[in-house]
Image: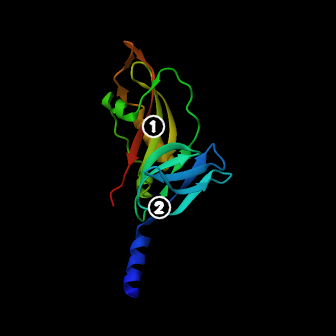
Amino acid sequence: MLRYLMIFALILFAQATSLSGTVFDAAYAEVRLLQGGEVRAKTNATADGEYTFPKLDAGEYALSVNGRKVLDLTLVADSPQLLDVYTRPSTNVPGIKLDEKTMKAKLVKNVTPLYPPSSRAKRIQGPVLLRVQLNPAGQVVDIEVIATPHSDLAEAAQAAVRQRLYQPTLLNGNPVPVQTEVRVNFTLLP
């Protein structure tokens, strides 16, 4: 019986992971991880914005800061993850806001980001979430980082997304500026 309990404990330990990072522009922010709308873990960032979730089950989560959902993420067993979050409110920009799925259908030119060699060597991976502003012609004119596992990945994602081109979005027959979010996933094979 004791042998089975030890094996079970090892299996549970092997499935645990951790998540840490920094919430910029939000000292003492409340950081929550949700699954299916239920809070699975929560913590408060320090005065420097640092947060940590030391033991988490692998799986799909939604991360929220101060009650605002920031992004969806996947935690992998035995793979500690770092995720920096930028909480600046979205600026009031002219035009309309469209979701990423709608904008994927309008994508005319896509550029694959280059995985930074330093991040690859350190095995840094994860999603980079960007807020992107398009002009009426469908060209990227502004990018803001919302969340990233590392600044090198954020720079690579921005460099690729800046080269994208979208079909113009029409409102009442006229092209308009668009704000959207873009997720760029950086994943290493085991």
Quadrant assignment, res 121: bottom left
How many residues crowd mark 1 within 10 Å: few (<14), some (14–19), many (20+)?
Answer: many
Q: Which residue is mark 2?
A: 80
Residue positioned 46% across, 23% down in the render: 96
What's the CA distance linking mark 1 and mark 2?
Answer: 24 Å
Tag on residue 6?
none
Of the pair 123 and 72, the residue shown nearer to us:
72
Tag 2, which secondary structure?
A: loop
Which amino acid lies under the numbered mark 1 shown in the image of this protein? Gln
Would residue 31 appear left or right of 175 to someone viewing this image? right
Which amino acid lies under the numbered mark 2 shown in the image of this protein? Pro
**Above-or-below relation of 140 to 36:** above
Would residue 1 appear left or right of 50 to someone viewing this image? left
Residue positioned 39% across, 34% down in the render: 100
- Foreground mark, 1 or 2, reads 2
Task: Find residue 41 and report its horizontal and vertical position in percent.
Answer: 53, 58
* Quadrant of the snapshot with the N terminus: bottom left
Task: Find residue 72 and report its horizontal and vertical position in percent.
Answer: 44, 47
Tag 1, which secondary structure?
A: helix
**Above-or-below relation of 31 to 13:** above
* Quadrant of the snapshot with the C terminus: bottom left
Q: Which residue is mark 1?
A: 158
Task: Find residue 136 and report its horizontal and vertical position in percent.
Answer: 42, 18
Residue positioned 56% across, 25% down in the render: 92
How many residues crowd mark 2 within 10 Å: few (<14), some (14–19), many (20+)?
Answer: some
